Image (cartoon, rainbow, N blue to C red):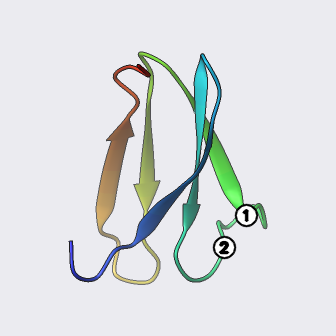
């Protein structure tokens, strides 16, 4: 991807932390944690684009 929006910050055996390349989440947090097998839907402001990120597995 030539113009990334998200970056992988860290991994554990059961979770991944994803941050924005620029800016922060509306909560003020720098990252969001996703558990293996779970998804998170993020909405870009102000354009309203939706991104669904799923952590499928960590190997």
Left-right relation of 5 to 7: left
Residue 57: % across, % down: 38, 19
In which quadrant will I find the N terminus?
bottom left
Q: Residue at x 41, y 16 (%)?
A: 37
The outermost residue toward the front is 59
The outermost residue toward the left is 1
Q: Are marks 1 and 2 in contact (CB under 8 Å)?
A: yes
33 lies above or below 56: below
Residue 50, which numbered label?
none
The 10 Å Cα crowd at callout 1, few under 14, some 14 to 19, many 20 or more, is some
Where does label 1 land, which residue? 30
Where does label 2 land, which residue? 24
The outermost residue toward the right is 28
Q: Which is nearer the N-term, disc 1 or disc 2? A: 2
13 lies above or below 50: above
Q: Residue at x 33, y 45 (%)?
A: 52
Residue 59: % across, % down: 41, 19
Q: Residue at x 54, y 69 (%)?
A: 20
The 10 Å Cα crowd at callout 2, few under 14, some 14 to 19, many 20 or more, is few
């Amino acid at each position: 991807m030539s113009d990334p929006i998200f970056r992988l910050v860290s991994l554990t055996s059961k979770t991944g932390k994803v941050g924005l390349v620029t800016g922060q989440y509306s909560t003020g947090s720098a990252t969001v944690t996703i558990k293996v097998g779970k998804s998170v839907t993020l909405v870009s402001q102000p354009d309203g684009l939706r991104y669904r990120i799923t952590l499928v597995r960590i190997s």
